[in-house]
Structures are given as C-alpha cells and as structure tokens.
Amino acid sequence: MDIQTLTRFFMWCTIIDGVLLIVWSFSWLFCPEWVYRTQKRWFPLGRETFNLVMYCFIGLFKILFLLFNLVPYIALVIVGN
C-alpha cells in the first residue's frame, strides 16, 4: 500500500468520523430531551447519569478521533509532500 492510498484512507476516515462527531454533539446540544427519551427506552438511567455518560462518550470519541484519524492524516500529508 502506498502513501497516497493511506492518505486518502485517513482523509475519508477523518471526514466520516468528524461528521459523526458533529451530528452527535449537535443532536445532544440542540435536542437533548429527544436523545434522552430515545435512549431511555433501552437503558433506564437517570437524567444526571445520562448527561454524564453522554459527556464522557463524546469526550472519549473526540480524543480517539483526534488520535487515530486526524493526527495520522496530517502526518501523512506532511510526509507525502
């Protein structure tokens, strides 16, 4: 596998995961009651616990997104030039 293929792979991974992060964050920010009601059907959690879990998951996803998608993509772009 050459460096251009890897760069394109990480570019698309970064775009897809970035869109997922934005959609997830905006849905939790702008319609938290809908998200809570939807998830409450499967997981019976209190509102405070749910807020904490969502905050932690979004934070973890953001860290993993930066570490495993964006940083390798930037490194490949730098090395490829």
Image (cartoon, rainbow, N blue to C red):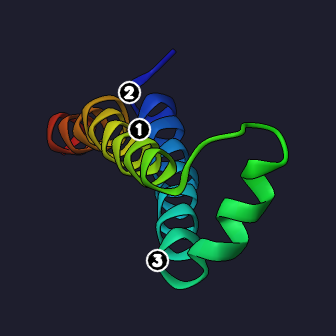
Q: Secondary structure at mark 1?
A: helix
Compare marks 2 and 3 and give the one earlier in the sequence: 2
Q: Secondary structure at mark 2?
A: helix
The residue indicated by pointer 1 is 7
Work out how far the residue at label 1 is from the one at label 2, CA to CA, in angstroms. 6 Å
Task: Please give the name of the residue rendered at 24% of the width and 38% of the height, measured from the top-left corner.
Answer: 80
Give residue 72's position: percent from left, percent from top.
Answer: 27, 32
Which quarter of the picture shows residue 6? Answer: top left
Task: Please give the name of the residue rendered at 44% of the width and 41% of the height, measured from the top-left corner.
Answer: 53
Task: Please give the name of the residue rendered at 38% of the width and 27% of the height, measured from the top-left corner.
Answer: 3
- Classify residue 70 as left or right of residue 28: left
The residue indicated by pointer 2 is 3
**Residue that lies at the very extreme toward the front in this rendered image:** 46
Q: Is residue 57 above or below residue 29?
A: above
The residue indicated by pointer 3 is 29
In front of the other: 35 or 58? 35
- Classify residue 58 as left or right of residue 73: right
Amino acid carrying mark 1 in the image = Thr
- Mark 1 vs mark 3: in front: 3
